């Protein structure tokens, strides 16, 4: 039976039906209602205040009898998406709407010497042209919006809006722009060299660079090593390249602002806008019903969003501002480039005695310190670890989170180094990883809520045929040798508070789940519907999920793979709360002449039945709704704190087979097996889609994707989808990606953890390890484009 | 100019250089075709012109006179029964964010019209001009093959 707090609302939650078993009390001995907890977000730990939920649903353990959760039900918004009815931001049309365009800096560093706006202002159909002097002080990445000082190529300098998008684009050409270039630095090496130009007033590195971390005694660890390797690894700048560009439609109604935005965080956009424009939060509404991909780049209001709001206020008309592809590929964030100098020391039997990382990260003109060191401290057992990260500012647009920021970069260096070490030791790469299995979180000195990486190794290796792999291929000496590689992964994706949900029962017995979360294409709508239907005892078809609107209860950004584990428990609790009320109401109606209380009722498939032997009384949700008239049953749910003193992580092991054409250097991935531990899986089909997508993005990172800035001019050379290569259908291997699907009930009561980012992390190193295996060489830099593979092969000769 | 779209005749007064994509999205409110790269690199604007796939961003509306344009909205008009390939995309979870989906479905319909018994290799080659950044490719292949006569017979 679910435990109630001291003064529970009568009748809730119902203990009847399947969703009932005993659970630990949520309230600590202190009796405090608001407590602190920690939440891992995008590789960093955040402290949050959380209100203890009024009751704690019992955990859905391995033995829970669940019918809808865990089922392969179809995506809820499938029909909207296959018919073109799903409306994305650029599809939103408002009456009298204008279209905005942004003038961008043509050089990497310098200043605007002339900005002549009058010609554009005089064009018929152009309604407003704005530059720095026309807008309030407003900062983006630490610099004033529309700054006259140029910090990177592509920086917004002016904006305008016109009757049509085409006219707006044409009007940009009427703006007279002259700039004076100053020396720039677009690589970390350049920015950190002694004679580097000043990239940022505060210095060319962040204030706390180098960020240091050490445990144990690395010198001693290295002295104890039988084998030591030192290598330098390099990773490129990767671009999110979501097909839907960043975009906003902004509309004012008096002093109230409504914004349609392609975003992973409607509440973040709301607070960004409110604070920038000096508005109370309840005068800004942000809506995002559908979005065409985010991958970390759409976590707050960007320049385009502020500009749309400002232009709309100025013209008193709705304004749509959608980035063009070049703007999208140039100025919406990226995965920053890294240089990782790695030293590993190990005993003859493979036990790591020391890990040393000295990394440089090229942030761009701004950004946060999401570096590669985390995974070096976490993934393998090692008593002596020292990491150093220097974050350099360069004259390029600011970095942002990109699917497992930091860990994806770090995994490449660490997992390549592990393979090189295995080779030096003459050990199987998988065996080396098993020997160094970390049974607790060494970085924080505490246990994991659960860790099944060993099962991932076992299941993945078996499905792949790892131990037999040499027999699977004929030869490594032909023109197209094959190679095998593997890598593993950790990512703290346990989610956490704050997250709130409401469940509303309508007069006809249908159910609305209302939460201010967002579905990026991950399947959030479907997952929440399944959780709510399961917890409610409702038919899935009766449940609608309303999200993507700040009019709904708060949840945080959909980032860090946290949504299912953060909001899912709140949805479940809200549904249980609503069900409790529904059963209580039913007890009164069904009890005529029989005397039934809510505890004797069960709900399944939107029908409430009496669970007493020999009784067959029942009432459907619809009948009950009709009886209740306009009584509004509203269930309320919130996400409780994370467990104290333990770390919630997700794990996986990937195994890859590649073929490399020796003469051309072309790499083809043939097979990719991925075994994941992400706790309970709410919908295996959606989970597999996520895993496959993450692997394919990781494949792009391994083989093709690299933003190229011209070092002399400092401008991007490949801001298109033709020149910035993302994987196509032709590049995809046979993928066998699966989840262990074992609930982690210590993490949260649904037992689910995140799985959006994890599959990307080990993909690139597993592929690189396979390429190294195929050619018998070392590959220390991605992407493994043909020329880079050829260059690496030649070095060996 | 006259545009025949999804079985309906439209008379539009547009500048000669208006693209088919702009005519559909901005003037006929058919927003299923998406503007992504604006230069024929991604396939998200794919529509059918007399049954053959074209990049609407690279096609002039004026050049479509006398031909039948089919957009995603024309496959199951008025909320009617879905085209079998639309159902196959849902059944196989061949979509994530859904932004590229209209273009993927129309390109695949054109393939199956030209080659009803398309093999996996045919599918992969034909569809390689339609990008999906969510990486839904394996399931898109599966969805299309489920509608291929050859695959159906082979099963």
Image (cartoon, coloured by chain):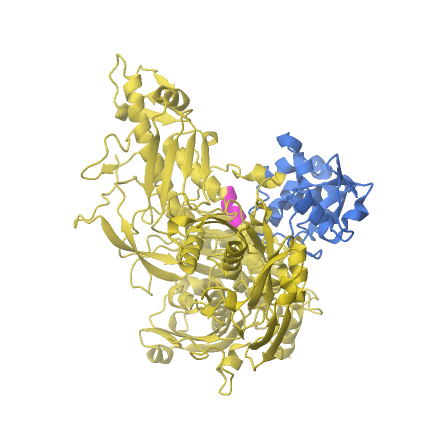
In the rendered image of this protein, does residue B136 appear above or below residue A576? below
Horizontal and vertical percent position of residue A761: 49, 60
The answer to which image quadrant residue A245 occupies is bottom right
Horizontal and vertical percent position of residue A631: 34, 26
In the rendered image of this protein, does residue A498 appear above or below residue A129? above
Letter of the chain in yellow: A
Horizontal and vertical percent position of residue B25: 66, 46
- Quadrant including the C terminus of chain A: bottom right
Task: Look at the image and say whether residue A317 sits in the magenta stretch.
Answer: no
Lateral position of residue A150 relative to residue B154, left or right = left
Magenta stretch in the rendered image? A685-690
Q: Residue at x 73, y 51 (%)?
A: B19
Q: Nearer the viewer, residue A2 or B52?
A: B52
The residue sitting at the bottom extreme is A195
Q: Nearer the viewer, residue A608 or B16?
A: B16
Q: What's the magenta bit mostly, secondary-structure-wise? A: helix
Q: Residue at x 36, y 47 (%)?
A: A499
The residue sitting at the top extreme is A593
Q: Nearer the viewer, residue A435 or A700?
A: A700
Q: Residue at x 62, y 48 (%)?
A: B100
The answer to which image quadrant residue A636 occupies is top left
Residue A262 visible in the displayed image: yes
Query: What shade does chain B have?
Result: blue
Residue A481 visible in the displayed image: no
Horizontal and vertical percent position of residue A781: 56, 72
The residue sitting at the right extreme is B66
Task: Look at the image and say whether residue A686 sits in the magenta stretch.
Answer: yes
- Quadrant including the N terminus of chain A: top left
Q: Nearer the viewer, residue B30 or A279?
A: A279
């Amino acid at each position: 039976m679910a435990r109630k707090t001291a003064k529970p609302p009568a009748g809730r939650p119902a203990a009847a039906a399947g969703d009932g078993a005993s659970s630990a009390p949520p309230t600590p001995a202190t009796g405090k209602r608001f407590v602190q907890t920690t939440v891992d977000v995008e590789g960093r730990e955040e402290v949050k205040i959380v209100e203890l939920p009024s009751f704690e649903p019992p955990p859905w353990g391995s033995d829970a009898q669940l019918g809808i959760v865990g089922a392969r039900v179809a995506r809820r918004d499938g029909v909207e998406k296959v018919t073109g009815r799903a409306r994305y931001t650029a599809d939103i049309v408002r009456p009298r709407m204008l279209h905005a365009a942004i003038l961008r800096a043509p050089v990497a560093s310098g200043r605007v010497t002339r900005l002549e706006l009058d010609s554009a202002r005089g064009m018929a159909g152009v309604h407003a042209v704005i530059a720095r002097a026309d807008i309030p002080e407003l900062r983006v990445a630490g610099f004033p919006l529309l700054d006259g000082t140029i910090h990177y190529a592509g920086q917004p300098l002016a904006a305008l809006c016109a009757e049509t998008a085409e006219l707006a684009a044409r009007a940009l050409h009427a703006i007279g722009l002259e700039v004076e270039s100053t020396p720039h630095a677009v690589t970390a090496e350049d920015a950190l060299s002694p004679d580097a130009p000043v990239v940022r007033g505060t210095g060319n590195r962040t204030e706390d660079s180098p960020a240091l971390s050490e445990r144990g005694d690395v010198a001693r660890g290295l002295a104890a090593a039988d084998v030591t390797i030192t290598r330098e690894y390099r990773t490129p700048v990767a671009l999110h390249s979501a097909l839907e560009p960043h975009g906003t439609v902004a509309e004012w109604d008096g002093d109230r602002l409504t914004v349609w935005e392609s975003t992973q965080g409607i509440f973040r956009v709301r607070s960004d806008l409110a604070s920038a424009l000096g508005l109370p939060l309840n005068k800004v509404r942000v809506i995002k019903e559908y979005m065409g991909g985010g991958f970390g780049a759409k976590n707050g209001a960007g320049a385009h969003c502020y500009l749309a709001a400002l232009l709309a206020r100025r013209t008193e008309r709705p304004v749509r501002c959608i980035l063009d592809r070049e703007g999208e590929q140039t100025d919406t964030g990226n995965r920053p480039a890294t240089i990782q100098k790695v030293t590993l020391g190990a005993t003859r039997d493979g036990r790591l005695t020391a890990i040393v990382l000295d990394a440089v990260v090229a942030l761009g003109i701004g950004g946060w310190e999401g570096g590669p060191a985390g995974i070096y401290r976490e993934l393998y057992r090692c008593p002596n670890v020292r990491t150093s990260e220097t974050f350099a500012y360069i004259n390029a647009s600011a970095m942002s989170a990109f699917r497992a920021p930091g860990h994806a970069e770090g995994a490449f260096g660490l997992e390549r180094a592990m393979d090189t070490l295995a080779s030096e030791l003459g050990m199987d790469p998988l065996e080396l990883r098993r020997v160094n299995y970390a049974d607790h979180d060494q970085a924080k000195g505490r246990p994991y809520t659960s860790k099944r990486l060993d099962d991932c190794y076992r299941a993945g290796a078996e499905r792949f045929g790892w131990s037999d792999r040499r027999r699977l291929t004929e030869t490594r000496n032909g023109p197209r040798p094959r190679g095998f590689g593997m890598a593993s992964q950790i990512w703290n994706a346990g989610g956490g508070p704050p997250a709130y949900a409401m469940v509303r029962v309508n007069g006809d017995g249908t159910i609305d789940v209302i939460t201010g979360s967002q579905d990026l294409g991950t399947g959030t709508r479907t997952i929440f519907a399944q959780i709510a239907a399961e917890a409610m005892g409702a038919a899935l078809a009766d449940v609608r999920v309303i999200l993507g609107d700040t009019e709904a209860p708060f949840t945080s950004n959909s980032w860090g793979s946290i949504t299912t584990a953060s909001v899912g428990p709140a949805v479940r609790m809200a549904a249980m709360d609503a069900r409790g009320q529904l059963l209580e109401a039913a007890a009164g109606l069904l009890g005529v002449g029989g005397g039934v209380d809510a505890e004797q009722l069960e709900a399944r498939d939107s029908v409430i039945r009496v669970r007493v032997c020999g009784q067959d009384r029942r009432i459907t949700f619809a009948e009950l709704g009709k009886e209740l008239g306009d009584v509004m049953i509203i269930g309320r749910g919130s996400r409780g704190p994370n467990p104290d003193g333990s770390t919630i992580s997700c794990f996986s092991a990937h195994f890859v087979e590649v073929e490399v054409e020796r003469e051309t250097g072309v790499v083809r991935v043939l097979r990719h097996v991925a075994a994941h531990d992400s706790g309970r899986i709410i919908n295996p089909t959606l989970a597999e889609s996520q895993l496959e997508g993450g692997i394919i993005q990781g494949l792009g990172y391994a083989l093709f994707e690299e933003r190229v800035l011209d070092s002399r001019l400092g401008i991007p050379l490949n801001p298109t989808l033709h020149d910035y290569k993302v994987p196509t259908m032709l590049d995809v291997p046979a993928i066998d990606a699966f989840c262990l699907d074992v609930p982690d009930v210590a993490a949260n009561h649904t037992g689910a953890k995140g799985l959006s980012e994890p599959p990307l992390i080990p993909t690139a190193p597993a592929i690189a390890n396979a390429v190294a295996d195929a050619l018998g060489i070392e590959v220390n830099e991605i992407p493994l484009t043909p020329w880079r593979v050829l260059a690496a092969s030649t070095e060996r000769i | 100019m006259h545009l025949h779209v999804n079985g309906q005749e439209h008379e539009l007064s547009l500048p000669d250089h208006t693209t088919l994509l702009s005519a559909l999205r901005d003037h006929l409110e058919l927003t299923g075709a998406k503007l992504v790269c604006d230069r024929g690199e991604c396939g998200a604007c794919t529509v059918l012109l007399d049954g053959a796939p074209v990049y609407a961003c690279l096609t002039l509306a004026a050049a479509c006179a006398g031909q039948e344009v089919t957009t995603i909205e024309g496959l199951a008009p008025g909320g009617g029964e879905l085209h079998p390939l639309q159902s196959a995309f849902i059944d196989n979870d061949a979509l994530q964010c859904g932004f590229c989906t209209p273009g993927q479905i129309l390109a695949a319909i054109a393939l199956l019209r030209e080659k009803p018994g398309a093999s996996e290799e045919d599918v992969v080659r034909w569809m390689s001009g339609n990008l999906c950044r969510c990486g839904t490719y394996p399931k898109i292949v599966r969805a299309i093959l489920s509608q291929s006569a050859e695959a159906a017979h082979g099963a």
